[in-house]
Image (cartoon, rainbow, N blue to C red):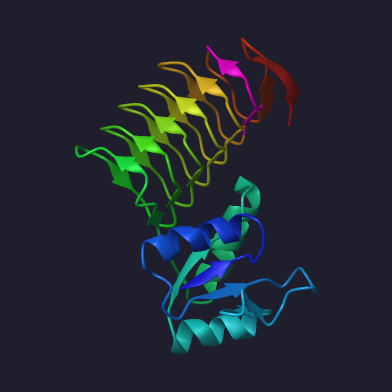
Amino acid sequence: MLIIGAKGFAKEVLEILHQNKETENLCFYDDVNSDNPEKLYNLFPILENMEEAKEYFNTVSRFFILGIGNPKYRKMLYDKFVEIGGEPYSIISKNAEIGSFENNIDEGVIITSGVVITNSITIKKGTLINLSSTIGHDSLIGEFVEICPNVSVSGHCEIGDGVFIGTGAIVLPGVKIGKNSIVAAGSVVRTNVPDNVMVAGAPAEIKRHF
């Protein structure tokens, strides 16, 4: 398994894998920071270029996990590592609660500790659902969405591709949030949100167009 990133959120991904007993042949990848040790926690090698990553995929394991946030960067790196032969891997914390009926979770999804997923929910590829967030029944979460800690997405919601929902935000029942939009931390979203905007407040209002 290769974790893309070696700081910040990548360390939280490591903890999920450790608790799930999935750390055999685990490596990290970081070609941005120059201050990395040779091994993270003196245990896990850190690869520093795409040639090393390609060799790892060809000789050790093809699976990778995105250990970074930000929908834009997650999609970019997802495509980059698939192109050299990697296979995106989904991880679900053993401390998350996943409903038993009609849930569909695509490849490359990360579901962290304390998350509650009820029933009849689709979560598309590359999405990150962070600590203690909840997703209500009959909701659709698009590709490369980032849902920050303690977010509440109510039932019958639709979250578009590339959406970012900040910490503690609440999305009320039946709301649709358009592609690539941003919901600021602590917002209460009561009405539909179009594509490519930033909303904030309680109730949430459009503050910026992209």
The residue shown at (63%, 11%) is 202
Which residues are drawn in magenta? Answer: 181-190
Classified by dominant secondary structure, the portion drawn in magenta counts as loop
Task: Determine which quarter of the picture holds residue 146.
Answer: top right
- Look at the image and tell me whether residue 124 can be seen: yes
The residue shown at (67%, 21%) is 199
10 versus 167 height, above or below: below
Of residues 61 and 85, the one drawn nearer to the viewer in this rendering: 61
What is the residue that sits farthest to the left in this orientation? 101
The percent coordinates of residue 133 (x first, y second) are 47, 34
User: Dividing the image into 4 quarters, which one contains the C terminus?
Assistant: top right
The percent coordinates of residue 60 (x first, y second) are 44, 85
Q: Using residue 45 as the reference point, say whether residue 152 is left or right of it.
A: left
Q: Is residue 189 magenta?
A: yes
- Look at the image and tell me whether residue 89 can be seen: no
The percent coordinates of residue 6 (x first, y second) are 64, 67
What is the residue that sits farthest to the right in this orientation? 34
The residue shown at (65%, 27%) is 185
Q: Using residue 132 as the reference point, say whether residue 5 is left or right of it.
A: right
Q: Using residue 1 as the reference point, say whether residue 180 is left or right of it.
A: right
The residue shown at (61%, 50%) is 69
33 versus 44 height, above or below: above
